[in-house]
Amino acid sequence: MVETSPAPVHEGNGHGVMHAPVLVLNASYEPINVCAARRAIVLVLKGVAMTEEENGHFLHAARITIRVPSVIRLLEYRRIPHQTRALSRKNILLRDRSSCQYCGAVLASSELTLDHVVPRSRGGLSTWENLVACCHGCNRRKGNQLPMEANMKLIREPRAFNLHTSRHIMRLLGHSDAKWRKYLFY
């Protein structure tokens, strides 16, 4: 067993390679998920997946040097059931592409809030269909009102995170990594 936890990662900027997104393909080459490079390396070392594409960085361990993957493929086909994602701040921001759903500003996650389209004080629930990413300015402007009462309009109707949304996000991430493009259908 190779011990990888204390190993340094050598890269240009010194941070982030182990958190870089990696496209996960089923054994049939169908894109099924995106995970962090750290998780992808574990899957490869366990013999569950193999590297299809590399991102150009290396992980140096005591007795081995591993190329960090950009795309991995599971060695055995996995039937993927209808996927549902947990309702969380991270998943709402991912669904809304880190953009305010009222003004369209794309911001860092720390600069975004979650807005209840129908305010909780007016019976609104914390559901996929009632939560949107929102900048601080728009959230203050909307306050305890419905969007139309505040003379604001949603850019996109909020919907639950589904397989279509997951594939769309994979395509968006794929635009930043040319090695993903041949595995994603546009």
Image: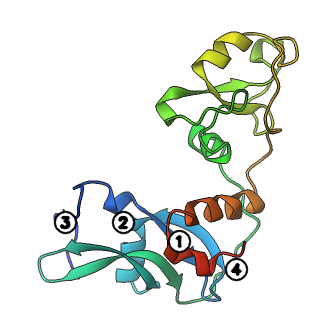
Report the Cα–Cα distance between label 3 and label 4. Answer: 36 Å
Q: Amino acid at mark 4?
A: Arg
Please tell me whether mark 4 sits on a helix, a strand or a loop: loop
Residue 38: which numbered mark, if any? 2
Find out whether the residues at labels 2 and 1 contact each other: C-beta distance under 8 Å: no
Residue 64 at x, y percent in the picture: 18, 83
Left or right, 64 with reference to 184: left
* Quadrant of residue 175 within the rendered picture: bottom right
Q: Amino acid at mark 3?
A: His
Residue position for label 3: 10
For marks 3 and 4, the one nearer the N-term is 3
Find out whether the residues at labels 1 and 4 contact each other: C-beta distance under 8 Å: no
For marks 2 and 4, the one nearer the N-term is 2
Instruction: Write the residue at 59% across / 40% down.
Output: 98
Residue position for label 1: 23
Please tell me whether mark 2 sits on a helix, a strand or a loop: helix
